[in-house]
Amino acid sequence: MAKTLVFMRTHIISQGVISEFLKLKNSVDFDCILFVDNNKNILTGNFDNPIQCLDFFGGHVKNIKCFLFNEKIFNSLGLPYYAKRNKNKSFAEIMWYCADYMFFAVKKYFPEYDYYWQLEYDVFCNGNSYQPFFNRYNGLNSDLIITGTDKVNANSQWYWVKKTDWIYKKVQLYGSFFPIVRLSSTAIDFLFKRRLEIAEVFSQVSANKKNRWIHCELFVPTELLNNGFSAAKLNEPLRFLPNYDLNEDRIFENPDNKIYHPVKGNYEASLDAMRNKIKKLEKFRVSIWGYRLGIFLYKK
């Protein structure tokens, strides 16, 4: 039987995220890790080793195997920071723009697996177990399992196709969707090598704003399917739930064992915090040479 690792990638720690990871971990036979973007130290401690078994919520949740990813580990991979605007951007931006980078990091620290699943933190299984989901794909030996793998025209209106003809000329393009992805070990190694090779080319053309670094949802299927790798479609509808905030407290609403994405972030709380800040603003108006100027001071 193929050895498989599943990692759930998150940049937040909440009751919803941890409960969903526990559901995943407790319902499958695979090894599971929580991949934490810890660059802003959302988890604090003396973490000399990025692989840690941690307790959460005052010890009520124990022994969660975590991979604490940060910019130092990213830099050790030698990958470029290129993102949407074709020049070095923030670490946070590459975390969503180049989601395939996470596979490279996990493979470096957990090299002994045949297949690697990546689930984003805002994926929700509306049932008690992920096992029915994985049972649908366990028998496949495809190098790539992902939503999409549809052919895309070079003149497509799909945003990620634009400005990529500096590298993709006379190549069949493929699109995909990245919330849930499985890659084989050999596919990860190939993609890592290709990212580094293409980075050398892009460094010569990146000054031209008409050129763009390749987004993962275009890069991964296009590279694999044009280079002899096999792919299978993820036959999940990935339904959207616009009216539920499942990141905070994920619930079962008529359990149907289907996969949902994205769960809604806690935007209402963010808006309330902003409203409170606005209430604390005091506005002063002064007149200089006939012009009225508004000055806002934040009242702590």
Image: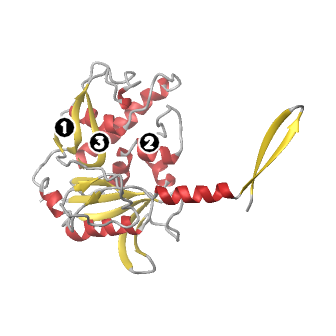
User: Which residue is located at x 21 percent, y 33 percent?
Assistant: 150
Instruction: Return the residue at label 2.
Output: 79
Residue bearing mark 1: 229
Disc 3 or 2, which lies upstream in sequence? Answer: 2
Q: Is residue 185 left or right of residue 246?
A: left
Q: Amino acid at mark 1?
A: Phe
- Image coordinates of residue 265 in percent, x first then y, are 42, 56
Tell me the element at label 2.
loop
Q: Earlier in the sequence, mark 3 or mark 1?
A: 3
**Residue 157 picture location, percent across and down:** 34, 25
Kindly indicate the quadrant of the structure image that contains residue 54.
bottom left
Mark 2 crowd level (few <14, some 14–19, many ≥20, 10 Å Cα):
some
Nearer the observer, 103 or 99: 99
Residue at 87% x, 32% y is 290
Q: Are marks 3 and 2 in contact (CB under 8 Å)?
A: no
Q: Which mark is residue 177?
A: 3
Q: How many marks?
A: 3
* Crowding near the residue tagged with mark 1, few <14, some 14–19, many ≥20 C-alpha atoms within 10 Å: some
Res 110 → quadrant: bottom left
Q: Within 10 Å of the Cα at label 3, are there few (<14), some (14-19), or many (20+) other Cα atoms?
A: some
Q: Earlier in the sequence, mark 1 or mark 2?
A: 2
Q: Name which residue type carries label 2.
A: Leu
Find residue 25 and report its image quarter.
bottom left
Q: Which mark is residue 191?
A: none
Q: What is the CA distance from the residue labelled 3 to the residue labelled 1?
A: 18 Å
